Each structure stands twice: as structure tokens, then as C-alpha cells.
Image: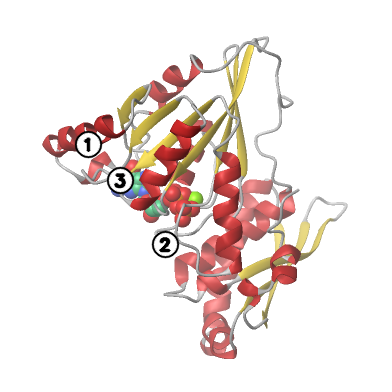
Amino acid sequence: MEIKRSGMITLCGRPNVGKSTLTNALVGEKIAIVSNKPQTTRNRILAVLNRGDCQYVFMDTPGLHKPRSRLGDYMVDVVRKSVADVDAVLLLVEPIANIGAPEQELIDRIRDLNLPAILVINKIDTVPKEELLAVIQVYSQAHEFQAILPMSAKRGEGVEELLGLLSHFLPEGPQLFPDDMVTDQPERQVCAEIVREKLLLFLDKEIPHGTAVEVTKFSERENGIIDLHVTIFCERDTHKGIIIGKQGAMLKKISTRAREDVERFMGTKVYLETWVKVKENWRDNVNLIRNFGYRDE
Ligand SMILES: Nc1nc2c(ncn2[C@@H]2O[C@H](COP(=O)(O)OP(=O)(O)OP(=O)(O)O)[C@@H](O)[C@H]2O)c(=O)[nH]1
Ligand SMILES: [Mg+2]
């Protein structure tokens, strides 16, 4: 069907509220990595959905938080820039009847820029229904949202309703991205992110937050097999030891799970080789941050 309406929609909110989970649910594909640890997403990620005569372009963003490193500064800057000239903003919040600092800051920005905004109360599967009323009340007093939608991104509940709501915010206009484009992330970037997701999955505390993943080789053989070499950077020698694990057990676990996901994503067999290197305090080194792909294009 010919696209007659298209628009940009930013997803924003505090860390860990479910922005990336919702992004994936909206487009029906795993585009953004997800973890139970805050500050998983570091860059803005586009996810595109064509549905009927509509093209939705979603922008997943890092969680808004108080930065404690240069990398954190960068992430917060990405959020600010993404909550700007868009057709609609989705403000995601936890099902809690209390407006925290990140929510207030985002509401202020939405108001200052006069942006159409929908409040998404996520994770409603974790609270009794009765509690939602108080949440809705607190937020409707704080701002006049175009709509308030309680949902569960993880269970996919409310997704269709949200798409229906959002279609009204898409202005008339041509397709912004080609049919087969689901994300603006290059394939090698998605592969690096998948490895980082496994680091977040298997490692504790500060260690995964201090890692960056760089793809050093990404090539396809004649028979379609992909050779993927990645280097995992961490901040300390002790962290390197933990990431590698006893006789390499941890690194093997991380690599195996990452390879399975990369194979699913690429639709072909993948040979993955991983190395671990130390770069002290890279999160406060502007040049290294840029090197690892955290920069404005
Ligand atoms: N119970 C429940 N958990 C959810 C829901 N949506 C997301 N989660 C979980 O919340 C955690 C964070 O999800 P993400 O999608 O990574 O959150 P995010 O907002 O992108 O986080 P950052 O990138 O760190 O800002 C994960 O463990 C998800 O499985 C939901 O509707 N219900
Ligand atoms: Mg995220």
C-alpha cells in the first residue's frame, strides 16, 4: 500500500522503564537491546514500521539520568536532542503515583516545545489494577497529555492501541525510509550491541556499564558464513579477569549466547571470535567515547 502519512515519534523516560522493549514491540522485531540494568541504551536508535498507509519512525533513546561520566553526559544530550522537533513524544513511566526528577524534566521540555505527548504507563503487569488510578491522576494533573495509556510492553499488551492512537499524529507526507529498512543501525553495530547485551545479562554491578564493544572484522565468505571479530573493552584488569572467567568459561558463555542471537539476526551461520582489552577510564575520555561510536553524526 502506498504510504500517505509518515512521522517521527520519540520514546523517552527514566532508565529501565521499558523504552527499548516497547520499541521492539511496536515494530515487531528486536532492534534495540534490552536488559534489567539501567542505562542499557547509549545511542538514539531508529526503528521503522510500515502499517497500512502509515510509516512510523520510532526513536528509542537512552534513559534520562544524572550523568556521572562523559559518556553519561553524551547519553543525556542524546535524549535532549531527540525530544525536539518530532511529531509526537511517548513519555514512558513506571506505574508509580509519583513524579520523579527525570519525568518532571521531560514534562517541562515537552511543554516548553509544545510537543504532542502521550503518557505511557508501562509495566502494568506488575501492579494491581486499582493502583493505576492514582498514577493517572498524578500525571494528568502535571500535564495535559493527548492521551494516557496503561500497557505492558513486555507482554505486548496495549501495543495495537498505541499504534492506533499514534496514527493520528502522523502528518500527511511521503515515506521517509525505504520499505526494507527497519533500523538506521548498520549490521555491524547491531552485532556489537548484541554482545553488549550479553555482557549486561551475565555480569554484575558496574562491570557491564564500563564495557564497550568494537567490531574489528565483519566479512562474508562465498558460502554465506560470516566472520565476526569483536573486542570487548573494559576499565580494569580485575574486570578483564571476571569477563574472561575461570578457564575462559564466562567469555565462552557470553560469546555463545551472542553468536546465537547474531545468527538469528543475520539469518546465517556466524564464526564469532572475541577478545577482551583494558582501557582505563574510557568513559571519561572524549576521544575514546567517540571512537566507540558514541558521537553525533
Ligand atoms: N514486568 C515488566 N517488565 C518490563 C516491561 N517492559 C520492560 N520490562 C523490563 O524492564 C527492563 C528494562 O527494559 P528496557 O527496555 O531495557 O528499558 P529501557 O527503558 O530501554 O532502559 P535504558 O535503555 O536503560 O534506558 C527489562 O528487564 C525488561 O524486560 C513490562 O511491561 N513489564
Ligand atoms: Mg533502552
Tell me the residue that label 2 is attached to: 37
The amino acid sitting under disc 2 is Lys
Q: Is mark 2 within 8 Å of ligand 1?
A: yes
**Precedes in sequence: disc 1 or disc 3:** 3
Q: Residues within 10 Å of mark 2 (few under 14, many from 20)?
A: some
In x, y percent, where is residue 47? Answer: 60, 36
**Precedes in sequence: disc 3 or disc 2:** 2
Give the quadrant of residue 53. Answer: top right
**12 on left or right of 100:** right
**Outermost residue toward the right?**
222
Q: Secondary structure at mark 3?
A: loop
| Cα gap from disc 3 to disc 2, whole angstroms | 15 Å
Residue 94 is tagged as 3
Tell me the residue that label 1 is attached to: 138
Give the quadrant of residue 57. Answer: top right
In x, y percent, where is residue 209? Answer: 52, 69
Residue 34 appears in view: no
| Residue 54 vs residue 11, the one in the foreground | 11
Tell me: residue 39, above or below residue 177: below
| Residue 117 vs residue 39, the one in the foreground | 117
Mark whose residue sits in front, 1 or 3: 1
